[in-house]
Image: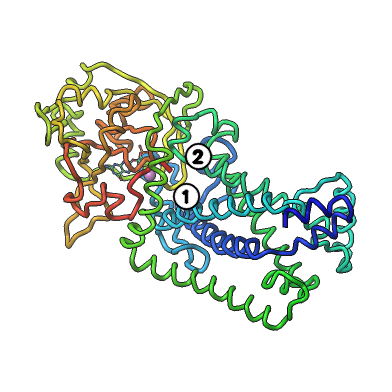
Amino acid sequence: MMGSWKVDRTTMNTHLVIAELGFPLWLRITHYINLLFMGLLIRSGIQILAAHPRLYWNDNSTPGKDWIRFTRKKVPVNKDVVYTSLDDEVPASPWLALPGGKNLGIGRHWHFFSVIFWVLNGLIYVVLLFATGEWARLIPTSWSIVPEAFHTFLTYITFHIPPASEFHPYDPLQQLAYAGVVFLLAPFMLLTGATMSPAVAARFPWYIKIFGGRQLGRSLHFLSLLAFIGFIIIHTSLVLIVHFQNNIRDIVFGSERASFWPALDIAIAALLLVLLIYVVTTIYSARHRRQVQHALGAVVDPTRNALLHGARSVQHYKEEDISPYFWVNGAPPTSEEYKHLAQNNFRDWRLEVNGLVKHPLCLSLEDLRDLPVTSQITKHNCIQGWSGVGKWTGVCVSEILNRCQPKPEAKYLVFTSYGLDEHSLDGEHYYPFYEVIDMELARHPQSILAYEFNNEPVPIPHGAPLRLRVETVLGYKMVKYLRSIELVERYDDIRAGQGGSREDTMYYGRGAEV
Ligand SMILES: Nc1nc2c(c(=O)[nH]1)N[C@H]1C(S)=C(S)[C@@H](COP(=O)(O)O)O[C@H]1N2
Ligand SMILES: [Mo]
């Protein structure tokens, strides 16, 4: 293919040569795979959006200041009412979302699983595009494409159809639109997607600023989705309306000389297969959440770990950046024990540090305040979608580790709360909220136990008297109302064994860097 392109180029009209390139099998297959994963990405993306159905045009997540919301719920103005961001989540329709309902964890597994294959497929497509000379059908080589495209636009807008001879093989408007989607919109989708990763935000705070911050990145990600949907609608309608028979022959057999009816049958069968995959993934995922968490996690976890687990937080926001509104997630403990501690200003509260350590510790708030103080202004990224900048003051987890001296076999830290995991109902019993992190994360300089939030003792809704901060991961790892830290060699024997309350009962991912 490549050889003939080079020879013919000098002698023949470029358009004819491009037409001769045809639609090779790899092009048709990558297009089909793309269709499959785009659908999975859109469906799981809608699921993720439903978990915080508000979008903001600045870096804060202040309710009421959203530019668009997909909920009628109003955030109570009364500060005494604890309204958590989980209360704000809306169930998604399984017709639109994968898998529907309140299934953020499963939606996210599908989103990250699909994006890996979407990117791989896209890379194969682009490499082959350049390797075979097919790029010439997408990338314009002359500015004359612009007036030509305008001419085509006028043709369509006045309800006329350009003659088949103008498709060599694409009309100018089509060529510009395809080039824009492949080389601008798709990369933009990935770049804005990356702004939402807490590890990226922590390691490269300048990166998310390019987009105006994480919430703007999130809004732009959503607007790119709308652009994609707009493109898909127009693209498919035109394929159906304009020279349909030729298009179907090209799409299925790669040649307009092929026969139409078999091409149509194959096209319909291929589309039904995609539809079937959407139905099966939706129903199966809603019913077998643990299996889906594990199966998709087997692909996603190693990828995420390789890319992001080593990232260290280097965030230093300014006092002016502190968010005016900081959502609460996870309501305060309701036990008498905790209420009693709170009434007493937490004077009787103690943090137990035990497990695989040489020196178990039992620390009061005063003991903690006597240890070296550290302060950081960082961005908190909740898995549901909101974020907030806050100042946290406390003690580095590494200071605690240096004092308790973990035994060599200790690999993980289990943080347990005075609060309960509201999704862990087992008969009449709820289990305490807990989360596990590994030693590497625990030793990051910005992994701290915070007793102050914005220069005040941590308020009860935000985790009084002490809460964990681990700035490269999502909020659900940062246990509030801390009771104990236990060092362990493995965590698969703790409760459901997934590495934390949210992983156990809401099927969240094992790592929380995206
Ligand atoms: N004990 C406990 N800690 C918790 C939670 C919880 O429900 N219970 N929610 C987590 C989640 S999902 C988030 S986003 C953060 C929210 O912290 P904030 O309420 O201070 O904003 O706390 C985390 N720590
Ligand atoms: Mo969260």
Depth check, front residue: 100 or 493: 493
Q: Position of residue 78 (x, y in %)?
A: 41, 41
Q: Position of residue 228 (x, y in %)?
A: 65, 55
For label 2, the residue is 61
SS for dot 2: loop
Mark 2 neighbour density, 10 Å: few (under 14) some (14–19) many (20 or more) = many
In the picture, the disc for residue 75 is none
Identify the residue position indicated by label 1 in the image. 52
> Where, quadrant-wise, is the N terminus in this rendering?
bottom right
Spot occupied by residue 239 in the image (x, y as percentages of width and height): 74, 68
Give the quadrant of residue 26. Answer: bottom right
3D distance between C-alphas at marks 1 and 2: 10 Å
Q: 278 or 318: nearer the eye?
A: 278
**Residue 349 visible to an observer of this rendering:** no
Give the colour scheme shown: rainbow
Q: Quadrant of residue 151?
A: bottom right
The number of discs equals 2
Residue type at mark 2: give it.
Ser
On whether ligand 2 comes within 8 Å of the CB at mark 1, the answer is no
Q: Is residue 397 above or below residue 113?
A: above
The quarter of the rendering in which ligand 2 is drawn is top left
